[in-house]
Amino acid sequence: MIQLINVTKVYPHMKAPSLDGVNLRVERGEFVFLVGPSGAGKSTLMKLLYREELPTSGQVILDGKDVARLPRRAVPYLRRSIGVIFQDFKLLPERTVFQNVAFALECTDVPRREIARRVPAALELVGLRHKSRALAAELSGGEQQRVAVARAIVRNPVLVIADEPTGNLDPENTWTIMNLLNQINQMGATVVVATHAAEIVDSMKKRVIALERGRVVRDENRGTYGYES
Amino acid sequence: MSLRGWVTALRDALRNTARGNVMSLASMLSVAVTLLVLAVVVLLAVNLEEMAATAESQVEIKGYLCTARREEVKCGQRDLTEQEIEAILAGIRGLPDVETVTFLSRHEALEEMKRADPAQAEILSGYEGDENPLSDEVYVKVSDVERVAKVAEQIQAMRGVAKVDYGKEIVADLLAFTRAVRIGGLGLVLLLLFATVLTLSNTIRLSVYARRREISIMKLVGATDWYIRRPFVLEGMLLGALGAAVASGVVAWGYIRLAPAIQESVPFLPVVRPELILTDLTLALLGLGAVLGAVASFFSLRRFLNV
Ligand SMILES: Nc1ncnc2c1ncn2[C@@H]1O[C@H](COP(=O)(O)OP(=O)(O)OP(=O)(O)O)[C@@H](O)[C@H]1O
Ligand SMILES: [Mg+2]
């Protein structure tokens, strides 16, 4: 599913690399936690996957395709196969919950009838079907992140990437989101989550990859967070 | 790209134009002003061209044929025979760019003078026949003023043609005038087009900037560049067309009032009648506004679309 071969990323005007010769493989259907101190390169790694950034050297291979080599016009299609969730939700505050989720389908020209069927299903999964008509700005943080989850999965992506999805949430909402991601994984999607939520990583017993200063320093199945939180 | 997609985009564009409120109104008006100036320039140029064309159509070459009385050496102090005259006329008709050739014999010319001034008829009668001091004349119209000098030269070179006249200075002035009108008009029009695109793209850029968050999210969820561009392109077209509509309205209103007044006070000026030009001008302005709006949006978005 995901393969990184000797990936190095140096941002412009930066001396130290943010990723430094990273090699890793994630198989289809896996659930992976990405941990490490702030500035370790977790977000950078994820950005390479959905091609917000390009690697300075090395290869990022998704589904057998070298992401960096994709022609510009193929990038939207790559992104459609990935659901991305952010710490700051990235919702459109003046639009309704329904519209925010439908948005991901509309901009890929999915027929209206299909949208009318799939959006409620996705909202049902995150338990927000009753809030369809509320404006995104009127929701609590936990609810907003659930909308973002619904938006990420409404297209049935093969890969879901979450970059500190619970960074702004209280413990209860953190559990809700993590359980949702776990559920999505059970339904077949590969899930990669960058997080500082030590307790949850420890108790979920998933594969844990730790980054420090741009290098993979630990990669264990049924791993733990491993840092003071 | 589906029709529904365009409809959604149009709705978005309308909403954005409406929401842009004051800024959009201000920029729509500045677009209207540049297009208005442009329309005025075009109307002026069209009228000047019309004037030049009228003057041009009046330019003709007048050729004097040889007679026994003419002093030019090439005439050899003898009258031309009918066949010789026919040959000359046929020769002129055969020249490239010649449109019409009219022949007026010196006898007809004299008769005409008599008719024109009966008081002098008695005296003029004394000059009939071989006493006639006039020359046979040919009037030649040429399809293009620029070719007049060349044609005149060719006629002058013909055997049996004593002399040609064609208002050399007037033709040169006329040509210089039309050229100046064309170059000046084109330069001004280009400048104004540029100004319009600038105004439009500034507005669109504000609109893009206000929605940059939305754009970045769209890109993240896999929207194509065209999907993102569409509402902005439509917004630009709408803004341009609205500006053009205002400009056309003002221009039409002004021209319909002004043209007859000018025509009346300067009757010999060929003022282009409003009904002959305003429809075309309005359509052209509307189309231009829309196209410029689309172009401006396209360029304003480029920076934001870079992956
Ligand atoms: N756009 C950028 N331009 C320059 N440097 C950047 C950019 N993004 C990240 N960096 C640098 O790259 C390094 C890794 O950043 P990254 O965001 O990947 O860390 P992280 O592991 O996600 O940290 P955190 O846990 O705080 O989110 C940092 O030193 C950061 O300063
Ligand atoms: Mg980060």
Image (cartoon, coloured by chain):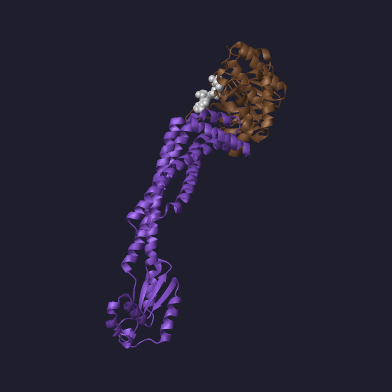
| Up-down relation of residue B198 to residue B210 (above or below) | below
At a point 42% along the width and 39% down the height, the residue shown is B199
| Up-down relation of residue B220 to residue A124 (above or below) | below
Residue A12 in sight: no
Q: Position of residue A203 (x, y in %)?
A: 67, 12
**As drawn, which residue projects farthest toward the front?**
B119
| Chain letter for the brown colouring in the rendering | A
Q: Nearer the viewer, residue A26 or B238?
A: B238
Q: Position of residue A224 (x, y in %)?
A: 65, 14
Which quarter of the image is occupied by the N terminus of chain A?
A: top right
Q: Position of residue A64 (x, y in %)?
A: 68, 34
Q: Nearer the viewer, residue B266 or B80?
A: B266
At a point 50% along the width and 44% down the height, the residue shown is B291
Q: Nearer the viewer, residue B98 or A96?
A: B98
In the figure, residue A53 lies in which quadrant?
A: top right
Q: Nearer the viewer, residue B55 or A172?
A: B55
Q: Position of residue B226 (x, y in %)?
A: 57, 38
Q: Is residue B107 left or right of residue B94?
A: left
In the figure, residue A74 lies in which quadrant?
A: top right
